[in-house]
Every structure is written in C-alpha cells, then in structure tokens.
Image: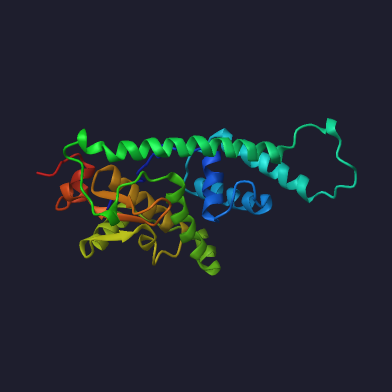
C-alpha cells in the first residue's frame, strides 16, 4: 500500500540573498556593475516565489534584499527633475553594487580553497567515488536546484495552471519510483528530465522532493559536470540493487 503521508525534506540553505543575486547575474552573463535593476528584481522575486512553493523557509535577509531591490527599482523609475544634492544620502544602488563586488571576491577566494580541497580529498577519503572527467564531483548550489524547478514551472501550459484548483494526491513514493525506474534504463538522467510529463506544479514539487529524499537515503547521487551546468542524477552504486523503501526504513544494502 502506498503511503500518502507527506515526507518532510529539509534543505539547509547555506546561500543567502547575495548568492542569489550573483547567480542571476552570472546566469545572464552580466557584469556586476552593469545590472538591469528592473530585470534582476523581477527574477529575484520569481525565485522567492519558487522557494515559497517548495515550502522552504525564507530567511528575513532575503525579504530585506527584496525590499532594497524594489526601493532601487522605484527610485530608478521616478523622473529626476531636481538636481541631486550631495546631502541626499548614500545611493542604495551604488551601495548594493559595492557589496556585491566585495562579496564576489570572498566567493572566488572560497571557491579557490574548495578546489584545492577537492584536488587533495583522496588523500583523506579512501572510499571516495571515482568519476570520469565528464562526471566531476562539484558542490551543488541551492539556486542551481531551484533553477531546474523554475524551468519546469515555466514550461507548464497556462491552461494547466487552472487545474491546480483541483484536489489531487501526488504520493512521494510514486514519484520516487518514477525516478528510480528512469535510472534503471539509463546510466544517468538530467534533473530537468525528471520533470518531463508533469502538468501540475504539485507534481513538479513532489518530484523535486522525491529526488531530495532519494539523495538523503543514499539511493541517488547528484553531480554537475561544470559550475552552473546541468545537474545529473545517478543511482548510488552502493545501493543500486536495494529497494528505496528498505532504505527509507533504515535497512542498509547487504
């Protein structure tokens, strides 16, 4: 019998609003100093909506940044008929850009240290999995995961969105079985491919939660071949032949 009770999957959001802004800027191949505030604000709010749809806790700093962006956007839309006074106070747009540039420096330094750690990790972990160059292990960023969900939301037909009003169950175990079945026929699948065929937001959300739960119980592995590249999902070789239901109940592979 399928368990229809919801499974709570908790995501530790290590990234903050500055990371989201840098993610959006990099995604559009822009320079930090050449940002379209109106467009970046729109995209930022869209990502917050995706986080809300997934029931992720949104820290207050995300909302503060949203308020700051809307303030900057509103100011940029107002006609400037009065000459700017030196006593008018700091420019929030310039302040934000300065903070982003400074934060970007710290991120790049952190990335350099992570790469060095990755190069030497096998000296410490004898059982670390070995992948080909095209399957290099990289840290998955929360916003890369959310990007896949957002793309799936964007692909939904507007007519299908109305169907969200209808009550329909999306048991997580059904979606977990769907993912495992996809991987039984392939070496790996793209995260985006897992959402193909889903016509409702709740179905997409449940698929996303199913992937996270399968990773959590060590049935799946997630990899990126390059920074901000597509996310690939693999069966974990250690639990390839173990039913995911056994893993959910704490039964390890023999």
Q: Nearer the viewer, residue 25 or 157?
A: 25
Q: Is residue 153 above or below residue 47?
A: below
Give the residue displayed 84% in from the left and 30% down from the top.
Answer: 87
**Which of these two is toward me, 250 or 71?**
71
- Looking at the picture, the colour scheme in use is rainbow
Q: How many marks?
A: 0
Q: Which of the 4 image quadrants contains residue 125?
A: top left
Q: Is residue 196 left or right of residue 180?
A: right
Please identify the quadrant where the C terminus is shown: top left
Residue 209 appears in view: yes
Q: Residue at left 74%, top 37%?
A: 91
Q: Residue 252: x, y in percent?
A: 15, 41
- Pick the residue in front: 106 or 89: 106
In the figure, is residue 185 to the left or right of 226? left
> Do we see residue 1 in this rendering?
no
Q: Position of residue 96 (x, y in %)?
A: 65, 38
């Amino acid at each position: 019998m399928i368990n229809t009770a919801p499974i709570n999957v908790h995501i530790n959001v290590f990234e903050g609003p500055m990371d989201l802004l840098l993610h959006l800027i990099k995604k559009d191949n822009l320079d930090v100093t050449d940002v379209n505030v109106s467009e970046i604000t729109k995209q930022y709010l869209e990502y917050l909506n995706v986080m809300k749809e997934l029931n992720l806790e949104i820290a207050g700093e995300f909302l503060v940044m949203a308020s700051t962006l809307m303030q900057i956007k509103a100011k940029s839309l107002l006609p400037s008929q009065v000459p700017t006074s030196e006593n008018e106070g700091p420019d929030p747009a310039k302040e934000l850009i300065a903070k982003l540039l400074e934060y970007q420096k710290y991120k790049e330094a952190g990335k350099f240290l992570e790469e060095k750690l990755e190069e030497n990790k096998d000296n410490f972990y004898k059982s670390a999995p070995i992948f080909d160059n095209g399957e290099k292990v990289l840290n998955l960023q929360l916003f890369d995961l959310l990007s896949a969900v957002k793309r799936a939301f964007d692909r939904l037909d507007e007519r299908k969105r109305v169907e969200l009003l209808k009550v329909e169950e999306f048991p997580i175990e059904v979606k977990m079985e769907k993912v495992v079945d996809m991987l039984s026929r392939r070496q790996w699948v793209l995260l985006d491919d897992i959402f193909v065929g889903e016509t409702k937001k709740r179905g997409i959300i449940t698929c996303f939660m199913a992937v996270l739960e399968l990773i959590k119980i060590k049935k799946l592995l997630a990899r990126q071949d390059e920074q901000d590249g597509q996310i690939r999902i693999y069966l974990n070789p250690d639990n390839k032949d173990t039913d995911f239901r056994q893993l959910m109940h704490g039964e390890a592979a023999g």
